[in-house]
Amino acid sequence: MSRRALVKAAARWGGLAPLAALAFLFVLPIVWMTTASFQAGEKMFQLTTEWIPSVWHPENYPHALSRSAFPRFFLNSAIVSASVMLGNVVFCTLAGYGLAKFRFPGDRLLLLVILSTLMLPLEVTLVPTFLVVHKLGWVNSYQGIAGPLLIDAFGVFLMRQFILKIPSDYLEAARLDGAGELRTLWSIILPQCRAALAVLALFSFRDSWDQFLWPLVVVSRDEFRTYPLGLVRFGDDYGNPPTEQMAIAVLATVPSSSCSSCCSARCARASTCRRSRGDVMDKIRIACGNRGWGPRRSSPPSRAAT
């Protein structure tokens, strides 16, 4: 191996070493929480940490789930998080498409106003939002929890910046073929925004699943409590063993981890997929009924002609 190759390998591994150390520091608490959820209750108060339990106690999980209505809390969080994720994907995509590909008076000012809301913490808008939800009669309901979270300024900005990179020639070709705006968005824009949609879905699902303050304010009945609210109430009860609290905390990380894995795989596949201009134009003709507008690929000669 040449000296230059050795220098490149050393630089590559030298850059990966700090990342591996940071990843280890982030994963270490999760590993400890997982192993602690399988230990006996008295093991939590020992001075030495037992990373691998000498005796495994998987019964901590069913015991913990039986102490409260955690299946109901889990279902509530799943419904709210899925609704918020779907709402962000739909509304942020529509808003980003309008801000990226349409010009109208005040469009830049509107974008500035949307981005300025990112500087407002939840505590500032908490009381006005609750008054609106209370006026609509949405207190203690799914729509009351998910309604204010269905669109986010970050999602609008993310989709706008991603759609801006798509050439406008594709849109003009689709319009010449007779496609409407929604058809153009569905057939031309969205297939090229899969990576951005995966990131938006991941962030919106994770933020909604971990949301604590807003559900705490708008929900007071157990049948609408989300999983974080049940987890905190379970931890405040001093009669519950700490190992069972760790078991409930481990279960709380499963949906976010699963969504992260699925969306990361989608981002990896979308980032490696590069569409040529001919492929996009063929997709435009297929989506619009192949009416003959726009450039066509030359068909290969038939065997009879050759």
Image (spheres, rainbow, N blue to C red):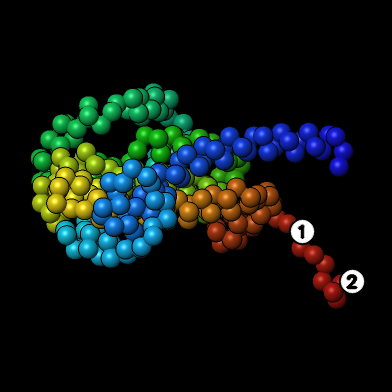
Give the residue at x 22% y 59%: 64
Residue 133, how many percent across, how many down?
15, 41
What amino acid is at disc 1? Ser
Alpha-carbon span between mark 1 and mark 2: 16 Å
Q: Which residue is the extreme one toward the front? A: 47
235 lies left or right of 170: left
Whether residue 174 is visible here, answered yes or no, is: no
Would you say 259 lies left or right of 11 here?
Answer: left
Q: Nearer the viewer, residue 306 or 189?
A: 189
Please, what is the three-letter code of the amino acid marked with disc 2?
Thr
Q: Residue at x 68, y 50 (%)?
A: 276
- Badge 1 crowding class, 10 Å Cα cut-off, few under 14, some 14 to 19, many 20 or more, is few
In which quadrant will I find the N terminus? top right
The local crowd at label 2, few if under 14, some if 14 to 19, many if 20 or more residues have their Cα within 10 Å, is few
Question: CB under 8 Å between callouts 1 and 2?
Answer: no
Secondary structure found at label 1: loop
- Please identify the residue farthest to the right as the structure is shown: 306
Relative vertical location of residue 109 with respect to residue 178 in this rendering, above or below: above
Q: Nearer the viewer, residue 93 or 13?
A: 13
Residue assigned mark 1: 298
Q: Which residue is tagged 2?
A: 306
Residue 302, above or below 285: below
Image quadrant in which you'd find residue 128: top left
Looking at marks 1 and 2 on the same chain, the residue that comes earlier in the sequence is marked by: 1
Residue 286 can be seen in this image: yes
Name the side, left or right, on which 77 lies relative to 274: left
Q: Position of residue 81 (x, y in %)?
A: 31, 51
Indicate the secondary structure of the residue bearing disc 2: loop
* Residue name at image x 10 percent, y 47 percent: 220
